[in-house]
Image: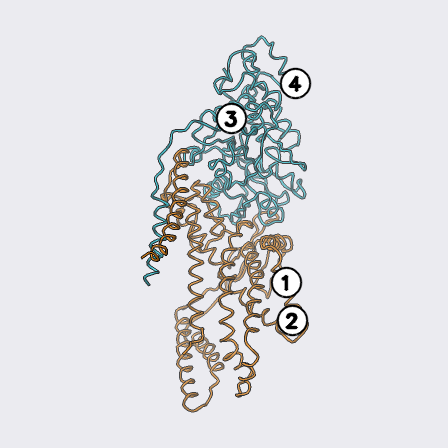
Amino acid sequence: MYTYIKRITSFLAMFAVLFVFAGEAMAKKSKTLKNTQKKGFVRCGVSQGLPGFSNADASGNWTGVDVDVCRAVAAAVLGDAGKVKFTPLSAKERFTALTSGEIDILSRNTTWTLSRDADIGLTFVGVNFYDGQGFMVRKDSGITSTSQFKSGISACTNIGTTTELNMRDFFTSKGISYEPVAFEKADEVVAAYDAGRCDTYTTDKSGLAAQRTKMKDPDAHIVLPETISKEPLGPVVRQGDSVWEDIVRWSLNVMIEAEEYGITSSNADSMKTSENPAIKRLVGAEGELGAAFGLDNEWSLRIIKQVGNYGESYKRNIADPGILPDRGPNQLWTKGGILYVPPAR
Amino acid sequence: MNSKIRKILPQIATLLAVVFVFGFFTFNAQVNMDNRGIEFGYGFLSQESSFDVQFSLIEYDGSHSYARAYLVGLLNTLLVAFIGIIFATIIGVVVGIARLSPNYLIERSAAFYVEFFRNIPLLLQIFFWYFAALRALPLPQDADAIFGVFFLTIKGLFVPRFIWVNLDIFFYSLIAAIISIVVIRNYARKLQESEGKQLPVFSISAGLLIILPLLAFLIGGVSLSFEMPVLEQIATTSFKYTGGLGLPPELIALTLALALYTATFIAECVRAGIQGISKGQKEAAASIGLTPNQILKLVIMPQALRIIIPPTTNQYLNLTKNSSLAAAIAYPDLVLVFAGTALMQTGRAIEIVSITMLTYLSISLAISALMNWYNKRIAIKEK
């Protein structure tokens, strides 16, 4: 008996130590930029395969609009858009990978919400795709609108996403009882829905459009017109490194602003002699924009030359493969969309 | 004095090292969390979870707390572990005995089963059962009734729900039956010890278990009706069953995979246990006139169980821990609901993972304690 008590006390003591050790916050400078330059590559967390956003081809080359954000940062801080190490992450792993320092940018079709921004040590730097949650159903089900949903419907989706919460809000507000079938990986969601396990598949509309291309018979499925939520997707960085945060934010903003001023990867060099000072600033021919981040003055020129402007990235990754040919809200504010970034000056 | 110090010193050094390592990691985690503005605390457990779960044994929806979601996941884990252990034990015992069968065909098929199922990774087997089932099972509207009442479809297994009237009287009749069986058993033992007569205890017990509840139905006012699952259309090609009791295909696939996989190991434990008893025991028992049934029940099994129980406990623990692979096929167990969705929505990785680890630890220790108690009870009392 005595040895038992002794054992238990020592076990408890160890546990107490685990929680009592109070760490004093140490004053630290932002090190992410320095580390990245020392390593020679940007560490970027992406999805496990979402066509148009982040998807690896057979030879391991990553493409997509989310991938391009990381490439832009690499072009800005390392001078070469190819110097990115991509880490595929599940929805569940992504934030832990970022906060634990395994990656430095999370560019993985991640919805910007208050609790994520404020609560768990993350900072969202902007929006590179305005999305909204929708539903996909089989065409032969005869359903053409979410208003035809009836109680008892089963819905396949991913765990660990805002999708699960929106789905509940939607069905509860309509008074429809439903069966949520939530998988950890997108591939299994698609497989289960495709096999007939669920009546509908719900996620961000861009995701639905992209996953539809993976199905046995893409034409047998339709995406319903309704959008049930706001899903501003954007890159995320760790809290507490404001310089790095600014670099990522402005790498994205430069791409969008470049499109606004008509600067493309092919005409960027010739734009140096433009009459417009705003254009000259963007291609590094005027002003000292890079100095604020500790970068040279051609950082933005490299982004535009190596990655292209936002419109080029969208066309290459999303429009041309036929995922979402219509840019919808992801059009510049000057052309009827809601892409509007602060001026780079 | 010197020898005492020599004995204690290494222990103190080890303790210090352990404390230091724990302390270092805790300190490091604290500093990092402070730097990133992450707070530590379990307060989130009382917040509204705002996500729904597919399958729950208790009443739950998104308006309940995270603590309740934890409970839902825990109960689902226990459910799959419980059913899995029962099936694994039944299959394991049957296959284990079959491997010792003198019949070549039975012995070989049992051996094939064991070698096949224990040598394929469990996750693959779970995927196989799930996606094979999904592909092979009919849509609800195409399903044929099994025995006229069960419907096995891609959306799950639907069975009639029992609706009882005067369930309590039925219950009392069962209790009465059990009490009389205990009394009769004691009487039979005394009779055998004093006069050497043997009563057919088994047949009497079975009779009591049937007759007393039957009386409850006939004169006690107990009645039982069934609520049949009914096919309902929710869209042109979408159907579902309402009413009755629905078991999701995820639960079925997971239980099947876990039971078939773990049963192979239990079968080997059973075979080892029986083969571990020397032939002389059986021959000696036969020579004093025991029947083959009595030999198995009174001589072989009590000794074999001593060998079978400890490794089988391990298999029970493995099955319980392996049930966490449920996350791959959307069965809402503790890992999927709590260490999955709840972790994601709250971002409280350290808190949730620590709770989940402690929970699995407690479940395992509980199973272990139960099996150790059973093992002690059946152990040979050395006099």
User: Drawn colour of chain B?
Assistant: orange
Q: Nearer the viewer, mark 4 or mark 2?
A: 2
Query: Label 4, label 2: how many angstroms apart (C-alpha)?
Result: 74 Å
> Residue beneath label 2, please?
B107
| Residue A294 seen by the camera | yes
Residue under disc 3 on the same chain as residue under disc 1: no
Q: Looking at the rendering, in which quadrant would you find the N terminus of chain B?
A: bottom left
Farthest residue, direction bottom: B195
> Residue beneath label 4, please?
A266
> Residue beneath label 3, please?
A248
- In the figure, A111 relative to B186: above or below? above
- Residue A154 locus on image (x, y percent): 54, 48
Please name the amino acid that badge 2 sits on: Glu
> Residue beneath label 1, please?
B115
Q: Secondary structure at mark 1?
A: helix
Along the line of sight, the residue nearer the viewer: A246 or A28: A28
Query: Label 2, label 1: how many angstroms apart (C-alpha)?
Result: 12 Å
Which chain is depicted cyan?
A
Please name the amino acid that badge 1 sits on: Glu
Along the line of sight, the residue nearer the viewer: B146 or B38: B38
Q: Secondary structure at mark 2?
A: helix
Q: Secondary structure at mark 4?
A: loop
Query: Label 1, label 4: how many angstroms apart (C-alpha)?
Result: 63 Å
Residue located at (60% from left, 9% from top): A273
- Residue B356 locus on image (x, y percent): 44, 50
